[in-house]
Amino acid sequence: MKIGIIVGTRPEIIKMAPVIRECQKRSIPFFIIHSNQHYSEEMDSIFFDELELPAPNYNLGVGSGLHSNQTGNILIKMEPILVEEKPDIVLVQGDTNTVLAGALAASKLNIKVGHIEAGLRSYDRMMPEETNRILTDHMSEFLFAVGPNQEQILDKEGISADKIHTVGNTVSDSLFQHLEIAADKSQILDDLSLTENDYFLVTAHRASNVDIPAHLKELLVLFERLHEKYEQPIVWPIHPRTQAKLTEFGITIPSYLKLSPPIGYLDFIQLQQNAQLILTDSGGIQEEACLLGVPCITLRENTERPESIEVGANVLVGRDADKALAAADKWLNTEGSVSWANPFGDGHVAKRIVDICLGDKATASNEQAE
Ligand code: UD1
Ligand code: UDP
């Protein structure tokens, strides 16, 4: 059994890390292909260092580009590596262009694809990630669903039940493995002059929010209204896409917004777990906020992660400041601590994924012997 592991962006590195560690622990032969869709030190190598991951065996160096260009470059560069390495399974995680290209390259070579975080749907085809998710699921032999919602979605789309494995989300493995280390090591609250439970944390990088000047300005109005009402510092580790758009549109940032470059995982966990409120359009941060017991206001009209809304941890507000204030009022005026059930996994998800990959290989060998 040989596993090919594909990563390309910040969230893929973080959520694939537990699977990589599980392969190392069990001495399973594996290799890592990094598309380098993310390449800036603070979006890429910082996570390999902090999560103590081996360097990728192959770095495709594709960088940024238009969607087809980026996806096509990954495909072209991935194919000869897969031909040479001949993995039994290729694992991809999430919904990025790297995931789609990795799954397609493997699938064209009749290599089995395992899709981690399968079955998520926003039902918003304007999101490039929605196309990536749907196509990847339908090319995969192993669909590692997070929970029953995803299982049902995949079933409705006609994917046979024997391909679907409901395992939880590896975001829980990564988070639980690093919570204590983050609390021990991170100095981020002091560095940013923040007090525990006395600031709001913001992230935004979706094309629908940041690529259109009017939309980006609406977000700033929303933040301003929150600041006027609560007078809290708002911390914003800014995604390079968003920084590039602020510069391109000539938008200046008011001083109550504490902007920083993207920060490392340990510091970011520490910032999340001590925030009073998180506002985000990120997928992974909706999950982490829910796991950490911090209320989340999602700056989108839809989400492929409805579970955190169902358990009462998350509210969708789009860019509507009134809705955001109403959600903040509700949470911040709640007496005592807020709590909810955890729908995103128990921290042992990678082990299940690797078990299932190995199980299939055993079955395949038996079938070949017959
Ligand atoms: C990508 C994924 C998105 C994921 C996000 C995680 C797709 C279609 N999008 O979005 O699903 O949520 O990663 O963060 O795959 N840039 C840098 N340095 C970097 C990377 C990007 O400066 O290391 C800048 C470039 O200006 C680039 C822009 O960010 O053009 C966007 O990068 P890209 O990877 O295309 O998309 P993301 O918005 O990061
Ligand atoms: N993250 C981080 N530093 C930051 C912002 C986010 O380490 O400055 C981590 C966060 O903890 C989560 C992941 O990056 O695990 C989410 O990535 P992102 O929001 O870029 O992508 P998405 O989840 O939306 O695809």
Image (cartoon, grey):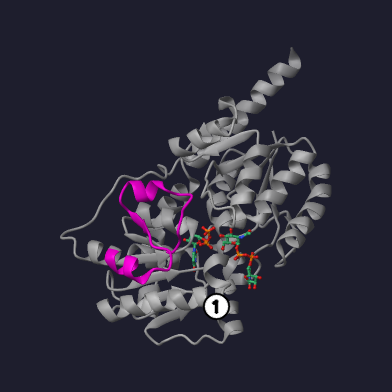
| Residue that appears at 32% across and 69% down | 322
Please tell me how crowded label 1 is: few (under 14), some (14-19), or many (20+) other residues with Cα within 10 Å: some
| Furthest-top residue in this view | 370
Quarter of the figure with residue 194:
bottom left
**Front residue of this view, candidates 192 and 295:** 295
| Quarter of the view holding residue 136 | top right
- Residue range (magenta): 299-326
Above/below status of 199 relative to 310? below
Q: Quadrant of the C terminus?
A: top right
Q: For disc 1, does the CB lie below 8 Å from ligand 1? A: no
The percent coordinates of residue 59 (x first, y second) are 73, 59
> Could you tell me residue 114's position as x and y percent?
63, 39
Badge 1 is on which residue? 213
* Secondary structure at numbered mark 1: helix
Q: Quadrant of the N terminus?
A: top right
Relative placement, left or right, of 53 versus 305 is: right
